[in-house]
Amino acid sequence: MKVLMFGWEYPPHVYGGLATANFGISEGLHVQGDIETTLCLPHPFGDEDQRFANIVAMNCVPIAYRDVDYDYVKSRIGNIMNPDLYYELRNHIYADFNYMHVNDLGAMDFAGGYPANLHEEINNYSIIAGVVARTLDYDIIHAHDWLTYPAGLHAKQVSGKPLCIHVHATDFDRSRGQVNPTVYGIEKDGMDNADCIMCVSELTRQTVINQYHQDPRKVFTVHNAVYPLTQEIAEIPRPDHKGKEKLVTFLGRITMQKGPEYFIEAANMVLHRTRNVRFCMAGSGDMMNQMIYLAAERGIADRFHFPGFMRGKEVYECLKASDVYVMPSVSEPFGISPLEAMQCGTPSIISKQSGCAEILNNCIKIDYWDIHALADAIYSICHNESLFDYLSEEGKKEVAQITWEKVGAWIRELYLRTLGW
Amino acid sequence: MKTICLYFEIHQVVHLKRYRFFDIGTDHYYYDDFENERSVSDIAERSYIPALNTLLQMIRDNGNAFKVAFSLSGVGIEQLEMHAPQVLEKLQELNNTGCVEFLAEPYSHGLASLANEESFKLEVKRQAQKIKEYFGQTPKVLRNSSLIYSDDIGLLASQMGFKAMLTEGAKHVLGWKSPHYIYNCALAPKLKLLLRDIKLSDDISLRFNNSEWEGYPLFADTYMDEIAALPDEEQVIGIFMNLSALGIDQPLSSNILEFLKAFPACAKQRGITFSTPSEICMKLKSISSLDVPDTLSWMDEERDVSTWLGNPMQREAFNKLYSVADRVRIARDPRINQDWDYLQASDNFRFMSTKPSRVGMDRGIYDGAFDAFTNYMNILGDFLNRVNSLYPADIDNEELNGLLTTIRNQGEEIEMKEKEVIRLQGKVDKLESEEDKLRLQVEKEVIGKDAPKNPSHNTPAKRTVKKKQKD
């Protein structure tokens, strides 16, 4: 079975959770053995892992005819695309796009990531997808998140192949209900025309059914998974805090969706009763200054720290140094980060409003608004060694069972159902 | 001749309220009154009263050929006193028929038997006392909380003077043996053991209303046929369960009470009788001893204590709780003791269980095991603080016990001395009145004589009184 997959980001160039999920899904499908994935990315850097999927660089796909010789193409884009593929794609240009900002190869550039002209980039991506969809041979189309829905739709119209869309988040999660009409429009259009909708949690599935009015029969839950830690990270030692000061960590974008203010209020309650705990809010975001102000206003700034944005190994060092990981998200479609914390042996407290709460048992679940329960849970883990040990050990074991391989098997099953094979 | 020993447990936990860690030190009331009232009156209405009515009717209809045994935990009795006294009245009515036996069990329905012998003994005594107050019976047969039993507990029970204990007919203990005989404790041969028949008991309490079970629907005559079909030598069939199985676990709409009502008639046709545990112990001899080195109970598939002490959190809570057992016993503070009873109830530990269970678990007010643990530990934290602040923590238990004994002895001594003071005071009064009389006589005689003899007696007596008061 051949899958044409549209993605937006891919490791090692990670902007958000989408990259990790996309990589995991590609690997999970690859392990199934009979699935061949072609993954379209707007701006690959050439250092992406090509073992699990053939990557098509959308910024090298010609949409306007340019007569260039082989060596020139090779020297320009040889590191990310085979020149033969370039010529083949060039044979499938379907309209005159010379009025667009095309470069010397007849291709369009992407900034990568999430630039200000995102809507324009989405549109360009969809135009290019038309060329790719006409060139390649595939059985099914799989589009990740709303950025790629138009491209997926375009491919479906061109080829008549079924379209699966993968909902990693909806605008309802990002905005606490105040949706952006343009984004909602793109999402709704994609879902209306999809043959199968995969949601990362039951929570998201319900949003898709209720807010986007989709037929429940074509909406499925496909929970995310997590990668085993690499050797290097697994070897980072866990400091022993028994009888010493404890560290409670929040790690993520400091935005409305993640509920940082609930974390500060709970920290305030804990610090009123006990002093041997420190709090750490790692990450950055539009609410960061507001949160620094709030912590100062509560008079806990001496024990509440903002180390800023962390990447790569730093994240794991921080998780391993923590005694409690807290994710009080107001609405989290899935939330891979608690799984990573649990891999590091850090007990996690997550909100019931997050998708990963559906598959995790060895963590404490609270309502994001219930700061009393949150404070109580933090206090309990810090003061009862048995609870800390249990959550740490059992959490690790539990997360080890959640693999992309199982996710891949389930997606394969959904492909087969959609194709009616 | 076969005989059925029917036994029901009556116990309801005192639900703890939501107690945050910021309440530690400020709030010493731990109970969810609303939930307690709601759950107890609900269970009384849907289960206890209809079930007890049926049992009473069965005894009356069958000319006392039907017999049944109950055990009530002290905490359960307290709950019923408060929220459903009609259940206790109904039990007294049942008791008046003379066909009902009440068994002893630990007052708190707790796990003291696994942690502290002294506490366990005291609890059983208190519960037996309470049973005597209500029903005029002194229990002769012991049943530990959730049928927890091991050789050591058996020995303890025998030392306390019990003739028999009820426990689980667990397969891993019995092996090829049948639960339908009387056994005796390996360490105390005098103590007889009555075993619960797992299959026949669970058929009623666990599966009766399960339409997917191959035995469904279960009728009284097929049930009795099964018992009658057992080999002739197997004489005792122990059917033990919670009373709330009738009505709560198996709803009344499943006609479970009609099923029960048909028991005596069906049994009679097949020559099966009903007996109370003590009757069985009097009539039958033990056929062999039963080795139970590891503790067993009637809970879950494992039939051991893993429901309460299976994970490290439960063990921490348990160890912390019983670390003050001696101190609480010594201190004899009424409020502390009451809280001690309620906190000990094994249900509190069951709520923290992380075992996967086929039977859905009712965790009371809690979301899950971690929630239950957090809440319990907060309460326990406050409780331990109170116990420790009662007497300084650096005095160890023996020393404290010594001091308290001294204080108590001094109290007794003072009491004795006060009695003596009163006696001597009486003597003084008597002497004084005699002196008065003599004076009168002397005054009458008037002439010349004026040296009275008695005052010399009087003063030393007064002196001794003063001396003793100083002591």
Image: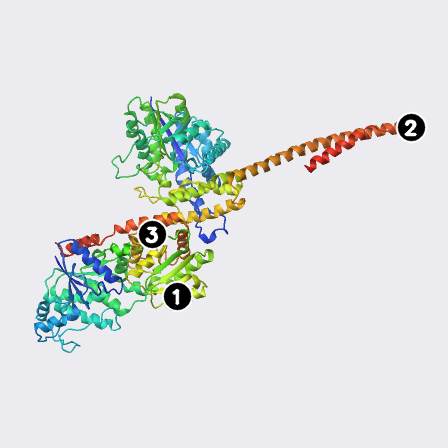
Q: Nearer the viewer, residue B202 or B391?
A: B391
- What chain does badge 1 belong to? A
A114 up-or-down from B212: above or below? below
Give the spatial CA distance, label 1 vs label 2: 110 Å
B161 up-or-down from B382: above or below? above
Q: Is residue A386 left or right of residue A114?
A: right
Is disc 1 surrounded by few (<14), some (14 to 19) or many (20+) residues within 10 Å?
some
Is disc 3 surrounded by few (<14), some (14 to 19) or many (20+) residues within 10 Å?
many
Q: Is residue B4 left or right of residue B103?
A: left
- Asked whether the viewer can see residue A62, the reply is no
The residue at the far bottom in this view is: A99
- What chain does badge 3 belong to? A
Q: Nearer the viewer, residue B297 or A239?
A: A239
Instruction: Give amino acid for label 2.
Output: Gly
Percent across and percent down for residue B160 are 46, 28
Percent across and percent down for residue B271 are 33, 22
- Which residue does the numbered mark 2 point to in the structure image? B448
Give the spatial CA distance, label 3 vs label 2: 107 Å
Q: Tell me the quarter of the image containing the N terminus of chain B.
A: top left
Give the spatial CA distance, label 3 vs label 1: 26 Å
Instruction: Give amino acid for label 1.
Output: Met
Q: Tell me the quarter of the image containing the C terminus of chain B.
A: top right
Circle 3: element type: loop
Do marks 3 and 1 both belong to one polypeptide chain? yes
Percent across and percent down for residue B158 are 43, 27
Q: Quadrant of residue B116?
A: top left
- Which residue does the numbered mark 3 point to in the structure image? A363
- What chain does badge 2 belong to? B
- Which residue does the numbered mark 1 point to in the structure image? A291
Q: Quadrant of residue A331?
A: bottom left
Do marks 3 and 2 both belong to one polypeptide chain? no
Percent across and percent down for residue B432 are 78, 31
